[in-house]
Image: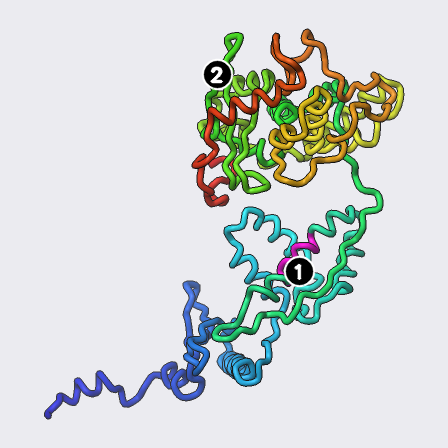
Amino acid sequence: MHCDPATLAEQWPSRPTEEVRRMTFQHRGLVKRVHTNGTFTWYIDKRVRRFGRLCETTGTADEEEAGRYLAHRLDQIRRMLVYGERPRRTFREATAHYLKVNAAHKRISRDALALRELDPYIGTEWIDAIHDDSFTRYRRARRTVTASTRNRTIGVARRVLTQAARLWTYPRTSLTWLAEVPLIVMEKEVHARQAYPLDWYEQDLLLGELTTTVARMARFDVSTGLRDQEVCGLEWAWERRVPDLDAGGMRRSIFVLPAWVTKNAEARIVVLNDEAQALLEEVRGEHPVYVFTHQHHRRRRTRYSRLNSTGWRNARARAAARYQEEQGQEAPEGFRCVRVQDLRHTFGRRLRAVGVSLEDRKALLGHKDREITPLQRAGDRLPDRGGEPNSAVTPRSHADRPRGHGQSRPGQSTGTAGGRTLVIIVQGVSVTGVGKRQDLRDRRPGR
């Protein structure tokens, strides 16, 4: 068969280019990828027998170094397939893989911050060489924070090692990244921060020093017992009208938080008392998506990312100074360091004071099966703070405070009001199909 010489020369060049010759004869399996800025990196694209396709970057533009890396990876694969040896991985590599496979996790952003904090201390360590003493430098460097804070950060590293030993396997083998999980002992908290429910006087002092928008959120929080992020991310789409509870010209509603929002991954009903309902009407119409927002410096409304901010800490310092000025004595340590979580403790403590049952308190606080905070389970008496006796749980009179959760309407008994109200709401609203989990990156403040 006759073929045109020009066609043959085009299909089978007699003089291949330098790049093709290098890839074909010197390092078979290396491919040069050129970036938009003109630089390039050598990548591995090679099929290995009994293993499959090996595709990864060498991380270098030096061909000789890329060739050595390719030979190293091939030797690792051979040792793994033939002799059952695990390739060694650094903790930084395990961190990258953890963030990739758990990208849809609700708390992945918090885990990423913890792993970034640990990276200078154990990032270059082999995961099979990490043990409890590997975190000594980190513990010393972070000795100014509480032991529970250090434990939470180290707990993320322990979770990475656990998944490396139990979940992550190498292709075509049953070998996990790590043979076994090392024993990492958590520190004991010597001076643990105790919950501090506010009394009515302390609540007025604190709210009076907050800005108008933050004070609204704090009042709503102490009236509903929501967690910080549940208040900041509260959306109008989760509101449900309950006409059976309308009274005194006030239209009543509740919120049903989707499972992907709550801490225990279960849909939660949020009951609103008179004060919370009134706050809701004050902010209605300010934003089409979020309930509580503030005016951005670009003159657009956006949601808060968290309540525990510099403004909160400055406000509690001013409130503590006012306490000392008015009472003639230093404010209690719990009030000087009051946290946003203490608003939730205050809500639970007041529920207990008016006789709401433990089962209803768990439902209102969004607890699953575990016990609630001991201070919310204790008797009605609180330690004497030098002010009004028992003022942290003694309800205000009807003349100077809104009706709270568990307080009965005329003709109802106090001990059963919370339970009766909750039964009506559960029967009237379905908590299934409230909302599907959405990508948190698309729910950023201001979106």
Which stretch did the figure color magenta? 153-161
- Give, as a three-letter code, the residue at label 1: Asp
Kindly give the residue lying farthest to the bottom in the view shown.
1
Number of residues whose C-alpha sits closer than 10 Å to that of mark 1, classed few (under 14), some (14–19) or many (20 or more): some
Residue 205 image position (x, y, % from top left): 74, 20
Q: Left or right: where does residue 304 sit relative to residue 331?
A: left
Nearer-N-terminus badge (2/1): 1
Of 327 and 225, the residue lying toward us: 225
Dominant SS of magenta comes to: helix
Residue 175 image position (x, y, % from top left): 56, 73
Kindly check if marks 2 and 1 are in contact, taking CB atoms under 8 A apart as contact: no
Q: Quadrant of the N terminus?
A: bottom left
Say which quarter of the image contains residue 91: bottom right
Residue 293 image position (x, y, % from top left): 54, 28
Of 37 and 165, the residue lying toward us: 165
Residue 447 image position (x, y, % from top left): 46, 36
Instruction: Tell me which residue sits at (61%, 26%) in the image.
Output: 224
Q: Which residue, given by chain and number where applicable, does mark 1 sit on? A: 119
Q: Which residue, given by chain and number where applicable, does mark 2 sit on? A: 244
Can residue 185 be found in the magenta stretch? no
- Give, as a three-letter code, the residue at label 2: Asp
**Relative to residue 227, is residue 83 depicted above or below?**
below
**Relative to residue 403, is residue 223 depicted above or below?**
below
Kindly give the residue lying farthest to the left in the view shown.
2
Under circle 2, the secondary element is: helix
Under circle 1, the secondary element is: helix
Q: Left or right: where does residue 353 sit relative to residue 447?
A: right
Instruction: Tell me which residue sits at (67%, 71%) in the image.
Output: 128
